[in-house]
Image: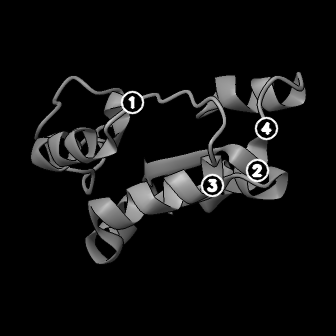
Amino acid sequence: MLAHPFRQAVLDGVLDPRRTIQIGIRGNSEYLWEFSYASGMTVIHAEEIGDLGIRGAIAKAREIVGSGPTYVSFDVDSLDPAFAPGTGTPEVGGLTSARHLEFCADLQV
């Protein structure tokens, strides 16, 4: 199951789903994200980044996580396979490497 470590962390009580945001999620199988939604996580799909923009996604992330300690993880599966041909999720529609660089530059962790 996708994002299994995060699901398990929520079930184990070590991750607050209300302070968790998944950005760049893609795929046409919404049932994969049922746990994320049901537990209170925020999900921003890759196709939403076009309208929201990187800065908008970062602003939403800052709103969700607040001022407490924050763990940031980057999953290569969010990249379009044109930019990461070895990804385990070769599904068209991921983010470009330039968008990821923009995200990291604007995140300022």
- Label 1 residue SS: loop
Pick whichever of labels 1 and 2 is earlier in the sequence: 2
Identify residue type, mark 4. Answer: Asp
Pick whichever of labels 1 and 3 is earlier in the sequence: 3
Pick whichever of labels 1 and 4 is earlier in the sequence: 4
Left or right of 21: which side holds 90?
left
Is residue 22 in view?
yes
Q: CA distance from mark 1 to mark 3?
A: 17 Å
Identify residue type, mark 2. Answer: Arg
Left or right of 65: which side holds 80?
left
Q: CA distance from mark 1 to mark 2?
A: 19 Å
Label tally: 4
Give yes or no for contact between labels 3 and 2 (Cβ–Cβ under 8 Å).
yes
How packed is label 4: few (under 14 Cα within 10 Å), some, or many (20 or more)? some
Identify residue type, mark 1. Answer: Phe
Q: CA distance from mark 4 to mark 3?
A: 11 Å
Single out the residue that lies furthest toward the bottom: 51
- Label 2 residue SS: helix
How packed is label 3: few (under 14 Cα within 10 Å), some, or many (20 or more)? some
Q: Which residue is mark 1?
A: 74
Task: Indicate whether 50 appears above or below 101.
Answer: below
Task: Locate residue 94, reporting x and y percent.
Answer: 27, 51
Give yes or no for contact between labels 2 and 4 (Cβ–Cβ under 8 Å).
yes
Q: Residue 97 sits in which quadrant?
A: top left
Identify residue type, mark 3. Answer: Ile
Q: Which residue is mark 4?
A: 16
Q: CA distance from mark 1 to mark 4?
A: 18 Å
